[in-house]
Image: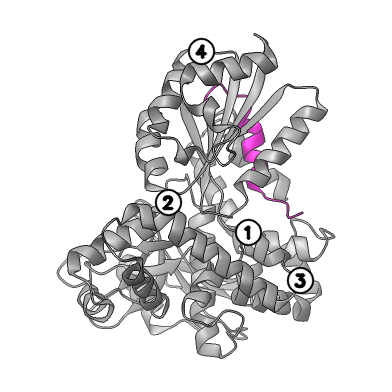
Amino acid sequence: MINRLILLDIQMHLRQPEITLITGPRQSGKTTLMNILMNDLDKKGEKCLFLSMDFESDKSFFSSQDALIHRVQLEFGDHPGYVFLDEIQRKENAGIFLKGLYDMRLPWKMIVSGSGSIELKEKVSESLAGRKRIFEVRPVSFHEFLDFRTNYKNAGNVYSYSQLFPVKAMELLNEYLNFGGYPRVILAATVREKLLEINEIFQSYIDRDIRPLIPGDHPEAYIRLIRLLAAQTGQLVNLSNLSNEAGITMPTVLKHLWIAEKTYFIKLIQPFYCNIRKEITKSPVIYFADHGMRNFAISAFGTIHRPKETGFVFQNLVGNTLLSELFATPFVVHFYRTTDKAEVDFIISRPDDPIGVEVKFTSIRNPVISRSLRNFINKYHPSEAWVVNLSFSGSIMVGKTRVRFISFFGLPDVIHDLVGSIERNYMIEEKKFPYRILRQKSRK
């Protein structure tokens, strides 16, 4: 079984009265996490009930609030317990349904999960304002993947492992860059099985998440757009070109991009700018939530080997790492491009002191600064900038800016230190952020 770091966050929230809402893309491991939570609670002697909209025998219990309450009372009586509701996005008006249950102040803690449908993200979240905490379960991260593949012998010490076993660490990185982080794909024993699994996940996503959202439209046009986006990962999105090549109107392109992002399939990174007249501010950059799925979309699943191809996928991986580790923090991830061709892959925005992050799919031997990163440093004078590469760690000064060369294998630890420094600077008490702080301690 693949251990997920977010499990500790969710376990901590079980102590809180709010609804624990577990969301994320289809097949990312939400139901598995719920089963683990139930098993742990059962061992402690707690009462648990699991109901799913996927089970025909359970659907009648979701027909009304009274029907669900009667079912739970049959199991628990009036005693406290934990009610697990799976695939809640299938319930019509799920947000109002859950809001009413919560407002009754029943003696039961509710843990609810659902795939990343528009209904779940928009209507349920709005209805449950102040009544829930959202936990996004993404595909397995590389660091979770490496811990799993090394049988947790160096759990939480990915950087140390990469230093002790650099060849094996690179082999695992290349495997992850090719096949991605969906649990079923990781657990598949052969390349053929991995291909069958990723194909089933993609088809399920189209059939169960996308078709209901585009009635009257042809999903083939949506699939064609996804493939075009996959071919330009990490590049500026030209909406006009996408419209022409996909054979759909500009409004439809915008609609499909919105749907793809809301369903956790892609992420649009917006530009960082201060001088709106000089910097490119209209076109976002596209990244995929899972680069294995990105590879599958362009028929390159398991066959990414050339340095240029691997470089784009590695950039996608670094972007996903930044977005995941900075989720629910004050930081926002942007990119930097100017009309005179200065490009920095990512910008971690923070007030008056942005961090430029350049990605290099190479083992740097000498700390050299690119023209684009130097351009950014000279313009914004940040206190630090990062160059994420495969192995080299160190730093140099460029003026008053400390440029840190960071091995990708140690990147999450660097991000955790960054977030921790902000929490300390603002004198935030640990009791206000128990989940993040405990998670940081557990990694160390």
Q: Which residue shows up at 52% across the image and 25% down it?
A: 18
Does 439 sit left or right of 222 as displayed?
Answer: right
- Of the residues under marks 3 and 4, which one precedes in the sequence? 4
Q: Is residue 18 magenta?
A: yes
Residues at circles 3 and 2 in contact by the CB criterion of under 8 Å: no
Q: Which residue shows up at 63% across the image and 28% down it?
A: 14
Q: Which residue shows up at 72% across the image and 45% down it?
A: 442
> Type of residue at label 1?
Val
Q: Which residue shows up at 66% across the image and 66% down it?
A: 185
> Type of residue at label 2?
Phe
Instruction: Say which residue label 4 marks.
Output: 105
Instruction: Say which residue label 1 marks.
Output: 140
Indicate which label's residue lies in the foreground, 1 or 4: 4
- Tag 4: Cα neighbours inside 10 Å, few (<14), some, or many (≥20)? few
Instruction: Say which residue label 3 marks.
Output: 189
Does 344 sit left or right of 3 as displayed?
Answer: left
Q: CA distance from mark 1 to mark 4?
A: 35 Å
Q: CA distance from mark 2 to mark 1?
A: 22 Å
Instruction: Say which residue label 2 marks.
Output: 331
Residues at circles 1 and 3 in contact by the CB criterion of under 8 Å: no
Q: CA distance from mark 2 to mark 4?
A: 35 Å
- Of the residues under marks 2 and 4, which one precedes in the sequence? 4
Q: Secondary structure at mark 3?
A: loop
